[in-house]
Amino acid sequence: MRKLSISGDHFLLDGQPLQLLSGALHYFRIVPEYWRDRLLKLKACGMNTIETYIPWNLHEPEEGRFYFEGIANIEAFVQLAGELGLHVILRPSPFICAEWEFGGLPAWLLADDNMQLRCEDKAYLSKLDAYFDELLPRLRPLLSTHGGPVIALQVENEYGSFGSDKAYLNYLKEGMIARGMDVLLFTSDGAEDHMLQGGMIDGVFATVNFGSRAKESFAKLREYQPTGPLMCMEFWNGWFDHWMKPHHTRPEFEVAETLDDMLTLGASVNFYMFHGGTNFGFMNGANLFDKYEPIVTSYDYDTLLDESGKPTAKFYAVRKIIEKYVELPPLELPPFIKSGAYGKVQMTESAPLFTHLDALSHPVRKACPEPMEKLGQSYGFILYSTKITGPRIGMELVLQEVRDRALVFANGTFAGTVERWDPRGIPMEVPAEGLQIDILVENMGRVNYGPQLRDPKGITCGVRLGYQFLHDWTICSLPLTDLNGLSFAPMDGEEHLQPNFYRGSFQVSELMDTFLRLDGWSKGQVFINGFNLGRYWEKGPTKTLYVPAPLLRQGENELILFELHGVMEPVVTFVDKPDFGDFG
C-alpha cells in the first residue's frame, strides 16, 4: 500500500522523502488526443506530479445524468498520467473556481431559489452527495492506496475566500473518507489570516496559493500550521484574460526567481497553470466585484506551454531552475505538433435566427420573463418576446437585471443593446397598432469566484416600459446544442443586421493545428464540424480562436458562425499563429 504521508517537515512516499514538483493540466480544457503530449512535456520540464480540478458541471450537466466520456473521461486521463510515471493530485468538486463557468457548480442548482451554496444547507448537500456517490467510487481504484497514481485529494477549494462554515467543510471531509478516499487530504487557501482561518480543517493538511513573496506567504502558513511540508498549491505564474481588457503577461525571470525562492526553502510547488488550454463552448467563467467581467475563450494563461501546447520561454526558465535542485535527463520533447494556415474561407450560406426558432427551441408562455435555470437551461442564449399595446410616446424600455447582454428588436428591427455592465434603457415609441418586442439575451459566463457566486442568467427580474412591467411573454431557450435542424440557403449578398447563422466549408489534406481569425465579425459563437469551439468578440483582447487538429477531418470540414450583429464581408481566415491581442 503506497500512501503519501507527512513526517516532520517532509512528504514521504514508500518511506522516502518526496518533494512535489507539480503542474496543473485540466483535462477538460485539452482535447483528449493531446493529453499525452501535454503530460510528456510536463515530465520533460522536470516535474514529477500533475494536478487537475474536476468540474461538477462537466460531469453532471443535468441533474442525475452523469457524463464521463471523451473530454470528460477523468479516469482515462489519470490512468495515462500514471502510465507515464507521474503522481496525480486531484481537486474534486463541489467548487473549483478555475475561471470556469460557475466555478464548476452545475447551473441547475440555481433553479431552487432557497438553496444556499457552499455551506451546510440540506438541499445543497443532498445534490452534492448524489454526485459524490457517482464520482468518488470512480476515483477509488485510481488512488495510490489501490495501486493507482493519485496521492492526494483536495477538500473544497479556497474556501476561506468565500465562507467560514466549518461544519460544511467537515461534512465534505467525512463524506470523502466514508467513500474510501484514504489518501492524503488537503486544503488550499490564500496566505492571509481570514482565508486560512476560514478554509483550514482540523486534521487536514493545509497549503497556500500565491504568485510571489514566497517567504512571506509560507511564514503566514507557519503561523497556522507550525510543522509539516511547505507547499504552494497554486503558484500563479501567469494570469487569465477578460473581454475588453488587455492580455496579461508576466516575465519569465520573475517566475524563475519565485520558484528558486521556494525550492531553496525545500518547499513543494504546483504550477497554476503548467498549461492552460481553452474554455471551449460556453464554459468560461466571469468575475464580479466592481462590475461584471467575463473571461475570454482562450485560457492560454501566459504560462509554460501556450494554448496550443508549445513550450514558452517560461518552460525553459523553469527547467533551468529545477535543474539546480534535481538531476534531470537531457531534454526530450514529444514529436512537434505542426500548425498551419488554411487560408480564407467564404461563408456561402445563412440561416436567420428568427426564422429558425422552431428548429432550435420549444417556446413556453410565462407571465413574466424567467431566467434560464427555471426553464431547465444552463448555457447559450434565451429569447423573450411580447407585444406592447399602443400608442405610447416618450417611453423607455428597461431590462431590470439582465444577465448578461441583450439585443433588443422592435417589430424585427434592431433597437439597441443592453449590457449588464451598462444597463441603460432604450427609447421606445409605440405606434397605435402596438409593437412586437424580441429580446435575445446571451449568457456570457457565470461568476466563478467571490461573494456574487449566485448568478442566474437571462432576464432575472423583469422588463418595464417606463415604470410599468410588461407581461405575457413567449420564451425560447436557445442552448445551441444541436444545429442540425437549421435550413441553410445561399446568401443573398445583403448585409443582415440580425442574429444569423453563417455556414461555409473548407478542404483539409494535412491535419494541423490552426487559428481562426474573425476580422470584420462582431460577436458570436463558432462551431467546427459540430464542435462548439467558443465565443469571439471584436472587443478583444483575443483576435483568434485555437482549433486543435483533432477537431478537423481530412477532406471537407464544416464551419458555422452564429453572428449576433451582422458582417460586411462573410469571410474568415485560418492562420498559423495565435493573436492574444495587446497586453498591459
Image (tube, rainbow, N blue to C red):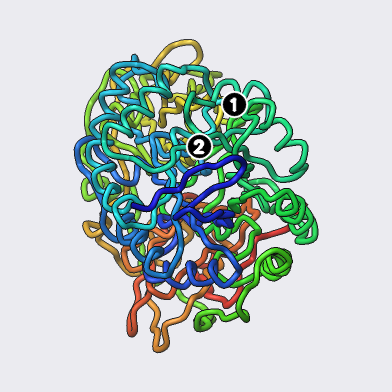
Checking the image for residue 206, the label placed there is none
Q: How many marks?
A: 2
Q: Is residue 442 visible?
A: no
Say which of 218 and 113 sits in front: 218
Q: Residue furthest front?
A: 15
Name the residue tied to disc 1: 424
Question: For the point 39% across and 46% down, which residue is it?
Answer: 54
Q: Is residue 9 visible?
A: yes
Distance from disc 2 to disc 1, alpha carbons, whole Å, reads 12 Å
Question: For the point 62% across and 81% down, which residue is it?
Answer: 330
Name the residue tied to disc 2: 405
Mark 2: secondary structure = strand
The quadrant where residue 247 appears: bottom right
Say which of 332 and 262 sits in front: 262
Where residue 221 appears, x then y in whole percent? 66, 32
The quadrant where residue 179 appears: top left
Q: Is residue 155 left or right of residue 326?
A: left
Where residue 231 appears, x then y in whole percent? 61, 44
Where residue 312 appears, x then y in whole percent? 66, 69
Q: Is residue 111 left or right of residue 327?
A: left
Crowding near the residue tagged with mark 1, few <14, some 14–19, many ≥20 C-alpha atoms within 10 Å: some
> Does residue 253 lie above or below 166 as drawn?
below
Q: Residue furthest bottom?
A: 509
Marks 2 and 1 in Cβ contact (< 8 Å): no
Question: For the point 57% across and 78% down, which residue is it?
Answer: 576
Mark in front: 2 vs 1: 2
Q: Amino acid at mark 2?
A: Arg
> Does residue 321 lie above or below 144 as drawn?
below
Question: For the point 52% across and 35% down, which residue is it?
Answer: 205
Mark 1: secondary structure = loop
